[in-house]
Amino acid sequence: MGERIKKLKKIRIHREGTTELLYSAILIFIISVGLWYLLMALNPLVCHIVMPLVCGILLAAWLIALNFYRCPIRYFNGDTEKLVVAPADGKIVVVEEAEENEYFHDKRLMISIFMSPWNVHANWFPVDGKVKFVHHQDGNYHKAWLPKASEENEHADIMITTPDGQEVLVRQIAGALARRIVTYAKEGEECYIDEHMGFIKLGSRVDVFLPLTAKATVTMGQPTTGDQTVIAKMK
C-alpha cells in the first residue's frame, strides 16, 4: 500500500488503564495508612506483623493490574503487502474453513487467537486497508475458546477492505471474564498494520475471517505476538 502511515501512540501503559491504575494506587495508599493507624492504636505488635503482609498483597494485586495494562511499542519489520499479521498476543486456537453467516454467508478461512489474562490486551489492525464498517453486538459470555463464542458472545466486528479490494473481517470477542470491548476503528478511516484497533479487558479472543484463497502460516497452539507474527498471506 505504498508507505504506511504510522500513528502509534508512544505509551508503555495503555490509556485504557491509566485512570484505573492511578485511582487504585490512591485507594491502596488510603487503605494502608488507615489500617496502619487503626492497628497501631489497637495493638502495635499485631500491626508490625499484619501490615507487611497486607501491603504485600495489595502491592502484588496492583502490579498484576499494571502488567495487564502494559502496552509495548511495536513496528512490523518489512513490507506488509498481502500479509495478515496477528491482531493480538496469545495462542492460535482455530485454523479452519468455517461458515461466516453474519456478513459473507459463505465459507472463510478462520484464524482465532485466544488471549489469556497474562497476555498484552491491546489489539492491532491485521491488514492495511480501509474500515468499511464497525458493528457491536451484545451477547453472552461463554468461555472464549469455545466454538460458539464467536457468534453467541458479545463481540465487535470490524470489516476492512484491503487495497486490492479483498474484505477481511476482524472480530473482538468477550469471554467469561472479559466484560468490556473497546474498539478504536472508525468507519471510513484508513487503517494500517502497527495501529491500535482496540483493547479487550481481562483476556478473550480475536477472530480473523479471510478469503479462502488466503494461506495460513500458523498452526494450532502456536503462540502469537500482536503486530509481529504473520498469520496468513493473501493471494
Image (cartoon, rainbow, N blue to C red):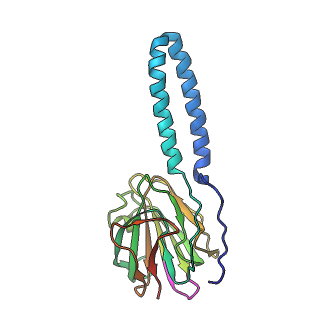
Residue placed most toward the observer, 152 or 63: 63
- One can see residue 103 in this view: no
Q: Is 84 a magenta residue?
A: no
Q: Does the magenta stretch include residue 165?
A: yes
> In the drawing, does residue 184 fall left or right of residue 169?
right
Where residue 46 appears, as percent x and y from the top left, is 45, 15
Q: Is residue 75 above or below residue 43?
A: below
Q: x and y percent of residue 130 in the render?
A: 60, 78
User: Which residue is at a point 50% across and 80% down the rendered structure image?
Assistant: 83
Residue visible at 44% across and 73% down in the picture: 208
- Image spot of residue 111 (x, y percent): 40, 73
Horizontal side, residue 72 vs residue 205: left or right: right
Q: How many marks?
A: 0
- Please tell me which residue is depicted at 50% across the width and 50% down the height of the picture: 68
* Residue stretch rendered in magenta on the structure: 162-168
Q: Can residue 65 be seen in this view?
A: yes
Give the camera-side residue of 141 and 110.
110
The image quarter containing residue 146 is: bottom left
Q: Which residue is nearer to you in this view: 231 or 161?
A: 231
Q: In this view, does 155 lie above or below 54?
A: below
Q: Is residue 69 left or right of residue 147?
A: right
Looking at the rendered image, the quarter that the N terminus falls into is bottom right
Residue reaching furthest front?
77
Query: Residue 8: x percent and y percent?
Result: 64, 64
Instruction: Give the residue drawn at x 44%, y 26%.
Output: 53
Dominant SS of magenta comes to loop
* Viewer-nearest residue: 32 or 20: 32
